[in-house]
Amino acid sequence: MTEDLGRDVMKHIALFFTPSLAGGGVARSMLNLANAFSERGHRVDLVLRQVAGPYLDQVPATVNVVGLKASPGWLGRVRALSAQYNDFGALLLPVLLAYKPSRTLRYLPDLVRYLRHEKPAALLSAKPYANLAALWARRLAGVPTRVVVSERTSLSHEVTQRSKRWKWRFLPPVIRCVYPWADAIVAVSNGVADDLSLTAGIPRERITTIYNPVVMPELHEKARAALNHPWFAPGTPPVLLGAGRLVAQKDFTTLIKAFARVRAVRPARLMILGEGEQRGSLEGLARELGVSADVTLPGFVLNPFPYMARASVFVLSSAWEGLPGVLIQALACGCPVVSTDCPSGPVEILENGKYGPLVPVGDDEVLAQAILSVLNTLPDRDRLRAQAAMFSMARAADQYLKVLLGNQEREERGYTGRPARDATGSAS
């Protein structure tokens, strides 16, 4: 049973993330939250850098989409610096804002104008630069809006992967200085929370874990939708399924190599849903390994659930994650799963391998063995669906409303720009 949080008094809640409603886990989860808050009677704004993306037509009429206007790059930098005055972070910020700063900063002045004009009761942001912009904007606007920042993936991996852009090395110290201004800091898994604490030096007790809203009420209905792909016809070989952006993080290279090992032992096919920069190299690898006839990359699919419901095994091959929603969705569809034990999320979702094998990152031989093991002994699908229930929309909405609206002390004391207390009331 869900709690009636905030049902008696309508609140204005804004959700800010970048860049748009493009296909991706952050956009999907924020849209899910927007829908849930709106259904509970709150006024909800989705604040975006770009009003675009395949999820745009899924925004209900009760949710207002706000497109921010870009300012000259220099103005965004000046506004960020002015927000950081008289803080230690001001010493590092010029470095962070140097050559080719985040495009999010170009939208900072308009975000300040939005907060001053609309004065939402709460603002939820996602991803590092959007989080920093939200906190700078609140300070510059001088409004009592509660700001909750959320981390969606491991900060250490983000910094490492972007190390060629040297300014990213200065991001954790700025985060350590700015994030304590937030009324609450949320991570989508305990692994992400631990990593944020270690990488940015934020006390672990200041970070609240709230699992993403992944399992929606309509998921099971969508999973029953017709699917006419010939690979899922009766009597055809089992289909292994992967899903996600075709980028290095998802490590579909290892998945294709593992599939080639599986294919050498028994008939099978591999389908990877998603689009991205590695399409050419992945297709080339399949040809090189002699399995291209049994590998298909259909591109981005708006409704992946019929595929998950009919696949023999869903495979998550990622090198790192925050909380992989596709793994949870596969469980909710009753699909057997195999996952890398990547940081972070899979070990929490699968409870240390109780609901599916966990294998080392990048090891195609062990991954193939795990896939063959699941194919040979398929688990109870109802048991998998029951495990996914802990990642329900209702549960996540309740928890987010607690941190967004549960403490109004900022309004009582007036905005000072001082670090806020956390969601439990402890001083930061």
Image: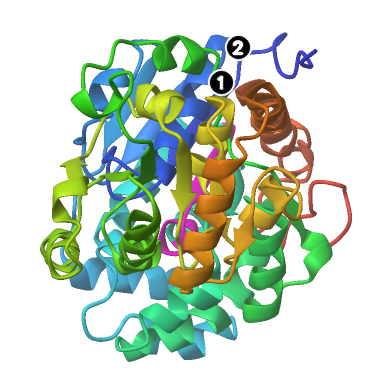
Say if the magenta span includes residue 130. Answer: yes
Q: Residue at x 75, y 52 (%)?
A: 208
x then y, percent, for residue 111:
36, 48
Q: Position of residue 13 (x, y in %)?
A: 53, 29
Give SS at disc 1.
helix
Residue on which disc 2 sits: 40
Taking the spot 46% from the left edge, 57% from the top edge, the residue there is: 127
Q: Residue at x 24, y 61 (%)?
A: 106
For the point 14% across and 60% down, the residue is 283
Alpha carbon separation for disc pair 1 and 2: 5 Å
Point out which mark residue 37 bears: 1
SS assignment at label 2: loop
Region rendered in magenta:
121-132
- Reply above or below: 215 against 148: above
Mark 2 and mark 1 in contact (Cβ < 8 Å)? Answer: yes
Kindly identify the amino acid type of the residue bearing the numbered disc 1. Phe
Residue 6 is one of the magenta-drawn residues? no
147 over 233 or under it: above or below? below
Q: Nearer the viewer, residue 70 or 290?
A: 290
Pinpoint residue 281: horizontal percent, then vertical percent: 15, 68
Q: Badge 2 local density, few (<14 within 10 Å), some, or many (20+)? A: some
- Residue with the most extreme front position: 265
Which quarter of the figure is the N terminus placed in?
top right
- Determine if residue 143 is in view: no
Q: Classify 245 as above or below 14.
A: below
Instruction: Check disc 1: other Cα within 10 Å, few if <14, some if 14-19, many if 20+.
Output: many
Residue 354 seen in the figure = yes
Percent x, y of residue 315: 46, 49
**Type of the residue with mark 2:** Arg
Mark sitting on residue 313: none
